[in-house]
Image: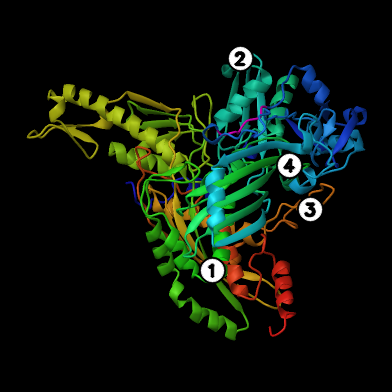
Amino acid sequence: MIGRSVRRVEDFRLLTGRGRFSDDRALPDQLHAAFARSPHAHARLEGVETGEAQRLPGVAAVLTAEDYAGDGMRPMPAQGNPKDVELVNRDGRPIVYPPLAPLAEDRIRRVGEAVAMVVARTAAEALAGAEAVEARYAPLSAAPDVRSAAAAGAAPLWDAVPGNLCVDDYKGDAEAVEAAFARAVHVVRIETANNRVNGVPMEPRAALAAWDAAAGKLTLWAGGQGVNRFHRELCHVFGWPGERIRVVSEDVGGGYGTRNSLYPEFTLVAWATWRLGRPVRWTATRSEAFLGDYDGRDLVTEAELALDGDGRFLAMRSTNTGNLGSHAVTFVPIARGPTVMTGLYDIPAAETVTKGVFTNSVPVTAYRGAGRPEATFVLERLIDKAARKTGIDRVALRERNLVRDLPYRNALGVVYDSGDFRRSQELALRLSDWEGFEARRREAAGQSRLRGIGLANYVETSTGWPVERAEMTVAEDGVVEVVIGTQSSGQGHETALPQIVSYLLDIPLERVRLVTGDTDRVEKGSGSHSTRTMRVGGHLLRQTADTIVAAARVRAAERLDAPEEGLVFEDGRFGAPGRNESVGLLELGPLRAVAEIETPLPAYPNGCHVAEVEIDPETGTVRVVRYTAVDDAGLIINPLLVDGQVHGGVAQGVGQALMECAAYDAAGQRIAGSFMDYAVPRADDLPFFEVAHNAIATGTNLLGAKGGGEGGTTPAPAAVANAVVDALGADGPDHIDMPITPEKVWRALRAMRRRPGLW
């Protein structure tokens, strides 16, 4: 069963309107919530007048930060400094985690921050009430990006964080790096901004809460990537023990890391239902999603690569300044990316400075890949620049420096345990017909098109929060129930996880029932992120399945009156050699096994992607015409699902490379506030993908899975950018920042035309 492309069992339900998303659930006597939001990016909040709103028809309550504090509610917790690569300030000062108040108290720090919550009979009445709230503001100067926020004289967002610099971390070997750069024959440099992007999941955030006064229990239904984190944070803000709160997450229409957090609106809906004693629901509009969904990326990098005369990489150094937004939601993107800044290449020395800056913008979270696409982009662009400077073929330059012998410890201390990086590059070059590209370039030129090709090697660091629990039960009715903390947001868990159980217990797929997304059933877990479900979940399923088989063997021996050690387990049945008698594992219930893990099981998915583009020189429009992906995701459970993950990941990476940008103006106003302003790839923006796998199992977990959820996203921006620069030729710019819009390309072409002898 493992390794077979089984069609997704959940698709019939989802494609025929039988899904159950957060907004699909309704309760009798429910109320609706809406929020009055700040139009300012930075201001003192001098008062909130609620009288007019309270008098409107249907309005049940208008709630402010004063009410929230009056009920003894706490700020939402800050977290996300990964302990295995923890960031610390170089000067020894502690990192400040400002409180995250779900309703603004005395200061506004980003556009869209909620200042009041209106609860009414209908959504329309709640919205009318929110529009009637009158807040008084004293505007302050805004700084929505890291350069303006870190500039001398910039207004501090938080008094305890001078200069808005929350994090200033150093890792590496300064002496070795300095010596390597001193003896280098070639040094290439890049200064680039990795553009801010939005997750834009198909399903906007939504929540419904209900209070059972008799039981003293609160229930929150809210789509996310893991209910246990929501539960833990709700217990914190209420100050309640776990048994008083239940969190349920049913079908979820897209996550990508942006749905990992308990958002302020979820907390407020839960608080309002407890305060008012009636169910309260809220569904974000798409405009609210653009204003309030946590963004990804937004990193400014200065980096250098040192080479000897033969093109061998000697050292790399970088300074990475991440935009944290208004609050420190997570440090994962700025912490994890630098650990793999040297990629799949043998770069003996490295150092990195990591900075995190508060700005007047929505917080940045761990969006798909979380730092690794940013690191890959910088490195692979540096290598192309080095090839241009040294005159060494860019493929040969990469091949010369790829890591040969594994395991390999990189210059930042990360150990790659398995893989064949050279074979992945060779396979990608062959499948993309790299050798035949020049003929395609000439053909495109004959049609007045510029054609370019680019490649990018990548490595992922799949670590993530390790806490996870799996419970497997063989019931008396012959059904195997699996309870686990990972949460699907579209990845196909209802197919893949039962596939694993089906294989391990040698039983039909339809005899496995998966239970997730309910804290009344899921005791412990960290949800889905960091490509962890098959890696960590599969590891635990192997442990529980082995325990089940061992316990079943004892019962089978009793049933068959035969010695345990002589029993043969095959086709889901135990039999004694030489006897025409057997008993099925599913007939031996009830059986139960539990496995937990609290230590990391890191793995390092890797691969090579090749992008081919064509440019219309009259308009600057870039079109991706071919795309080849070769990935090592370790043991593959379901190739169909992994290929789908690669397709979706590449689409997100291409989107960032060419069109996506969650932009702010200088005053901190969100420019990209709707799909009229924020472009995402459509079907006709993408070619059919050539996808292959160079799968090599890892030994870091019992299943051998490395994970395939982020591989497509990680190399795609670099591969596309390399292809665009290649299309513009040796006389064109050696770098263009993302998103590589038609205007940027058109301006580059215009500049080229102004040079003597060109066109």
Binning the other alpha carbons within 10 Å of mark 4 as few (below 14), some (14 to 19) or many (20 upward) gives: many
Residue type marked 4: Val
- The residue indicated by pointer 2 is 215
- The residue indicated by pointer 1 is 390
Q: How many marks?
A: 4
**How far separated are the C-alphas under marks 3 and 1?**
41 Å
- Callout 4–callout 2 Cβ contact below 8 Å: no
Q: Does 652 appear above or below 332? A: below
Q: Residue 16 in the image: state x and y as whole percent.
A: 54, 49
Binning the other alpha carbons within 10 Å of mark 3 as few (below 14), some (14 to 19) or many (20 upward) gives: some
- The residue indicated by pointer 4 is 362
- Callout 2–callout 1 Cβ contact below 8 Å: no
Q: Which numbered disc, 3 or 2, marks the residue closer to the eye? A: 3
**Where is residue 82, by image quadrant?**
top right
Residue type marked 3: Ile
Earlier residue among tags 3 and 2: 2
Q: Is residue 643 in sight in this rendering?
A: yes
- The residue indicated by pointer 3 is 671
**Where is residue 435, by image quadrant?**
bottom left
Which secondary structure type mostly characterizes the magenta part of the structure? loop
- Looking at the rendered image, the quarter that the C terminus falls into is bottom right
Q: Which numbered disc, 4 or 1, marks the residue closer to the eye? A: 1
Q: Residue 634 in the image: state x and y as whole percent.
A: 38, 48
Q: Residue 109 in the image: state x and y as whole percent.
A: 80, 37
- Callout 3–callout 2 Cβ contact below 8 Å: no
Residue type marked 1: Thr
Residue type marked 2: Ala
Region of the chain picked out in magenta, as a range: 77-82
Earlier residue among tags 4 and 1: 4
**How far separated are the C-alphas under marks 3 and 4?**
13 Å
